[in-house]
Amino acid sequence: MVGFYTDVNANVIGFVGTPIPEPASFTLLGAGLLGIMLRHRRKLNCTSSA
């Protein structure tokens, strides 16, 4: 979000607001990374025992 406003002294002040990801996004990201790690680990174990 980008915007500006004028204060009581007629100064124009600009701002940039970046949205913060919601906790569910971090949960999904973590679950996906965990799944990738487990799949990679399982794949390594299968190839080393054969």
Image (tube, rainbow, N blue to C red):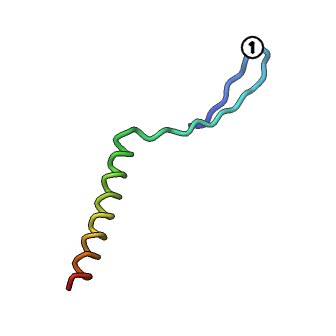
Give the amino acid type for the residue marked by disc 1 in the picture.
Val
- Residue 37 vs 28, above or below: the answer is below
- Residue 12 vs 30, above or below: the answer is above
Between 6 and 39, the one nearer to me in the picture: 39
* Quadrant holding the C terminus: bottom left
* Residue corresponding to mark 1: 8
Between 31 and 2, the one nearer to me in the picture: 31
SS class of the residue under badge 1? Answer: loop
Relative image position of residue 34 (x, y in whole percent): 32, 57
Mark 1: few/some/many CA within 10 Å (<14, 14-19, 20+): few
Count numbered badges in the picture: 1
Name the residue at the front extreme: 49
Name the residue at the top extreme: 8
Picture quadrant of residue 42:
bottom left
* Quadrant holding the N terminus: top right
- Residue 11 vs 29, above or below: the answer is above
Relative image position of residue 12 (x, y in whole percent): 75, 26
In the image, what residue occupies the spot 44% across and 41% down?
21
Relative image position of residue 2 (x, y in whole percent): 60, 37
Q: Is residue 40 left or right of residue 6?
A: left
- Residue 23 vs 6, above or below: the answer is below
In the image, what residue occupies the spot 79% across and 15% down?
9
In the image, what residue occupies the spot 34% across and 41% down?
24
Q: Is residue 20 left or right of residue 36?
A: right
Relative image position of residue 16 (x, y in whole percent): 62, 37
Name the residue at the bottom extreme: 50
